[in-house]
Image (cartoon, rainbow, N blue to C red):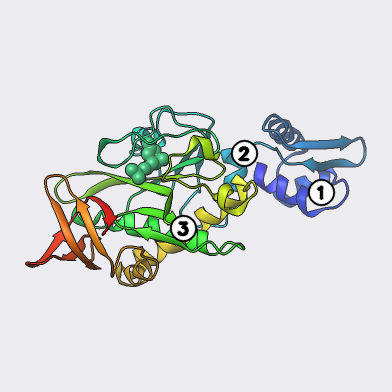
Amino acid sequence: MKSKILEILEKSEGYVSGEVISKKIGISRAAIWKHIKKLRELGYEIGSKTNEGYKLIKTPDFLTGFELERILFTDIIGKKVLFFEEVDSTNNKAKQIAIRENEGTVVISEMQTSGRGRRGREWHSPKGGIYISFILKPNISPEKAPQLTLVSSLALVETLNSMDKKLDARIKWPNDILIKGKKISGILTELSSDIEKINHIVVGVGVNLNTEKNALPETGISLKNEIGENVSTKLFLRQFLEHFDVVYKEYITNGIDKIIERWKFNSDTLGKKVKIIGINETFEGLAKDIDENGALILKTKEKEVKVYSGDVSLR
Ligand code: BTN
């Protein structure tokens, strides 16, 4: 209801009477008044004049889950957005609520106190960055869960590459996004499943959006650094979540093949000589391809091997 009222107010130049709103959405004028009150509490500046009605003066400067939900054109992703100023980790939060939430619910925070990276590392999460976790419940077998990392890295790299400024963002296997060889984003995918069936997957994406240079490691870069000006968090999230929705729907309808083609097109790793430090082993060779679950096919001196996870550096 609140969204509908806002939509009406946004579309009209002057004041709109309570009666007109009430006719359009079929609720009483008293109920409208209650929603207006709630909207004001949420930070919307709404003017009211006796005998004339209501007028939207300003949407909030700060972002809210409600505001994001309201502006998104999506079918699955972001139908519900939980927005925080600070959490320990958006992945932790998403995992706590995943059982009772619908797929597509997104947890977003402006800071994390215990951000987690791959392989048990810490993900430094200062203000300026944006930290996002998607709750997904695809009807696939558990061994295919890593495909969601491919879906997510593709959604992000394509979002970045569709921005006005030519960024040439690329995906470093397995799932880092780089600009000019420096890391702008990392992805941590976590699975809850039994042997046959997935309960849920939480995909966590950390993006250095407006992170100041001095808060970034030497190997990191932020969008603000690259573009030279502050990036609107609201606009970025809108573009990313809407594109994520498109790519995710393509995946659940048509499978992974086309996603992999596009992933390869945006890859920074394939075709290069690399060293990979895995959990127990180190490999060196030519990064030839990825398989349908995102494992890297590496041609070493002796043979071809599949590498499932690791840290890549160029030789
Ligand atoms: C990596 O490159 O090691 C992956 C980093 C993933 C960080 C994101 S930020 C949002 C989500 N919450 C977390 O605690 N981690 C992920």
Give me the residue at 67% from left, 32% from top: 42
Residue 177 percent across, percent down from the top left: 41, 54
Q: Mark 2 vs mark 3: which is more N-terminal?
A: 2
Residue 273 percent across, percent down from the top left: 24, 64
* Label 3: element kind: loop
Residue nearest the observer in this picture, 274 or 241: 274
Q: Say whether marks 1 and 3 touch (CB < 8 Å).
A: no
Within the displayed image, which quadrant is ligand 1 positioned in?
top left
Q: Residues within 10 Å of mark 2 (few under 14, many from 20)?
A: some
Residue nearest the observer in this picture, 84 or 280: 280
In front of the other: label 1 or label 2? 2
Examine the rendering and report whether any part of residue 105 can be seen: yes
Give me the residue at 53% from left, 61% from top: 167
In front of the other: label 1 or label 3? 3
Q: CA distance from mark 2 to mark 3?
A: 30 Å
Residue 241 percent across, percent down from the top left: 50, 53
Give me the residue at 58% from left, 61% from top: 163
The residue that label 3 is drawn on is 180
